[in-house]
Image (cartoon, coloured by chain):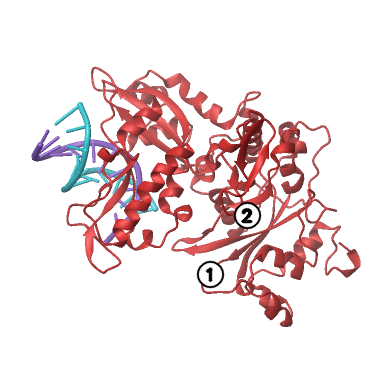
Chain colours: A red, B cyan, C purple
Amino acid sequence: MNNSSLPYDDSNIKSIVDYANLLLNKSLSDVLPKELDSEFKGKGGFGQKVEKLYFKYEPNSKPEPDFYKVGVELKTSPIKKIKKGYVSKERLVFNIIDFETEHKEKFSTSSFWKKNQLLLLLFYLHENDKLDFDYIFKIVRLWQFPSTDLKIIKDDWELIVSKIKQGKAHEISEGDTVYLGACTKGANNLSLRSQPFSEIMAMQRAFSLKSKYLNFIIEKGLKNEVVAVDYKEYDIILNNNNTVEEPLAAYKRLNLDDLEPIVKSVSEYEAGETFEQLVIKKFNPFIGLTESEIIKKINFTETKAKNKINILCKAILGVTNKKIEEFEKADILMKTIKLEKSGSLKESMSFGQIQYKEIVNEDWDQSYWFDTISKRFFFVVFQKNDSKQLVLKKVLFWTMPNKDIEIAKEFWLDTKKKIKSNDFEHFIKISDKKICHVRPKGKNSRDMMETITGSEEKKKCYWINSNYIKSVIN
DNA sequence: GCATGATCATGC
DNA sequence: GCATGATCATGC
């Protein structure tokens, strides 16, 4: 970068952010000379064009941040419009993980942290019928992770690295971690990389932020709320002696209305404890107790709601009347499971309705079903006792292994094919033992949904087989 | 007892 | 009004 030729001062964060803010509610076409249109318009690499044409530096994959003098990394990310507002369209992808070197570092010296600790995020509205030069920038903001999130991200990084150290880079999956993922990067299975502690080639992966986490940043951005960063807590997490410097002073506390975190401060963690371990620890004192004993112990207000077990589990985590912030941001799905006295599991687990008109246009990678089953699950398992009361048996975090996701993919492809050919009678059943099945779910048997041919069919939904769930929790 | 179809209760 | 999580009902 040559300072004199830039339209901003690249040694001054405020100058960079001010220049970025000129993009707000505008498109590249609005701010760039027209003659660039024909040369670059609609030809891929949107983020790179923003770097090259607007910020006027050559895109690179160097280990230091894009604005290296001030440690700021520039990222563009698409959002999409839904009924309720804007949500992230996809995960945010960071640097590719070099399996050969990343494991030699600690988090504070890792490639991820060095490059991405201070982000300048440009969220633009993605619309299918537009060319990239016409996408409107909706949110421009400098982002640092709140320390409670940074703690989780550091643990995520360490989990990824521990898999590399165990020679299991090929078994890494995005669902393993809470906020920071290791998503696959590369068109197909040809994008393989060597790993240091195993002969097996592993899928190339990059660090990424989960789409649900981005929704949290987007909400902050739309409300123009700033996020406080506690630099003392930063130092504790990073185990640093050299204090992290505050880039800009104007930050204040988070305040999202319908979310409540389990962990309010990093000091709640014991040494070496991860977020998931902390969650499990919160349940431990209640294992073996009946529902009514738990209710008494935590001073829970009785409810007749059908999902009262769910509400009770949240109360155990200290969250009442709200959603669990960490679970929302990490896209963790809490599911309660009720075993019979004998230990058998009567009910399968139901999920969303099959959208007949949408599934036919979905690709597996972007499908509802892949999105759902590749989440991290948190199972809370109860078992009935002699007097038919529910007793808390155990809790566990779980991600579906890749080999089972392949089976679920076969199931999904079969379902999609049948819906496309208007066959609503021969879906995969529980007895087909494909992990998942299709079953009706509606208000009653006359509750219908339109199909692509215009006919009406009974509403049905996705289920995970009870015997599969049973084997998972054992 | 299991597989499958059907429906309820709640909250947004 | 409808989707979702949960559960019931029936027949083999």
Question: Which residue is denoted by mark 2 in the rendering?
Answer: A225
Indicate whether A140 appears above or below A43. above
Callout 1, which amino acid? Glu
Evaluate whether residue A126 shows in this view.
Answer: yes
Picture disc at residue A5: none
Q: Distance from label 2 to label 1 (Cα)?
A: 26 Å
Q: Can residue A254 be seen in this view?
A: no
Name the quadrant containing residue A140.
bottom right
Which residue is painted at 43% across and 27% down in the image? Answer: A395
For the residue pair A95 and A317, the one nearer the viewer reads as: A95
Q: Which residue is drawn at 68% across and 63% down?
A: A47
Kindly give the residue lying farthest to the bottom in the view shown.
Answer: A35
Residue in view at x 68 percent, y 79 percent = A37
Chain to which mark 2 belongs: A
Does dot 1 land on a helix, a strand or a loop?
loop
**Residue A146 percent location from the top left of the image:** 66, 43
